[in-house]
Amino acid sequence: MVQFQKLEARANDPTLESVRFLYEEFKPSCFMFMVYEVSRRIFLTGCLSMFVPDSISQIAIGLLGSLISYRVFSHYEPYVEEDDGVVSEVAQTELVLVFFYALMVFATDNLEQHDGVFSGKVFASLLVVLLASTLLIALWLIILANFSGDELRSCFVGSRRGLLDVGRALSGLVTPRSPKDGGGGDVPVEAGAVEAEAIARI
């Protein structure tokens, strides 16, 4: 209740209009969180470039920074919207795993223990799926925010019925021969009849 009152008071304050974009997505208790967020991004881009490129220390510092960032976001939960918090948590987890993967690839390529697990195509494919997960989850949350459960259910049911109808129409392209026609095998039905039946079913 107190949180809601603070949000309402902040939203109705005209003196904050010029800086609203800096804090509006964060809770009142974390209104300066944008300072930390900008510092985090500078660290993960500019500061890491000061270390020797493609070195294990560069990867290790990046992994350490992403772990600290994950802990900060988990502790403070700064976002007003719960969906923003979910996307942020997925993105932070993804960042930690990317640095971990980079560390393991470096170790596999440069140390004597060449197990080949982290340098294989399968693990690389899993990393691509992982990188796409943030976008997919964000899209799913947008869909949930704009459509009710009943609308989504009816959409899935309609899609399923459409696929079943198409499957039935395609299965009608071939009809079994009768024993009078000379035994086993299938004969194609006339194209016009099948097409009319398929259109009628869809």
Image (spheres, grey):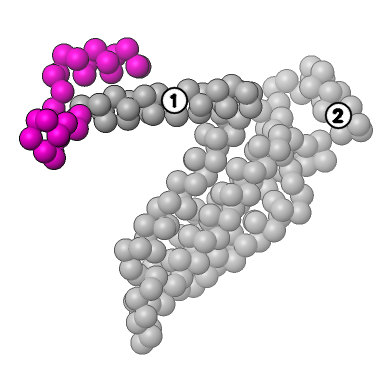
Using a 10 Å C-alpha cutoff, classify the residue at mark 1 as few (fewer than 14 neighbours), some (14 to 19) or many (20 or more).
few
Measuring from the top left, give residue 102's x and y in whole percent. Answer: 43, 66
Q: Secondary structure at mark 1?
A: helix
**Residue type beneath disc 2:** Phe
The answer to whether residue 14 is seen in the rendering is yes
- The residue at the point 44 percent across, 25 percent down is 161
- Viewer-side residue, 192 vs 91: 192
- Viewer-side residue, 175 vs 65: 175
- The residue at the point 49 percent across, 47 percent down is 133
Label ID, residue 161 = 1
Q: Give the residue at mark 2.
A: 4
Q: Is residue 150 left or right of residue 28?
A: left
**Residue type beneath disc 1:** Arg
Residue 187 image-quadrant placement: top left
Spot the residue most to the right. 2
Up/down of 41 relative to 183, above or below: below
Label ID, residue 55 = none
Q: Is residue 181 magenta?
A: yes
The answer to whether residue 58 is seen in the rendering is no
Spot the residue most to the left. 182
- The residue at the point 62 percent across, 45 percent down is 88
Up/down of 185 relative to 146, above or below: below
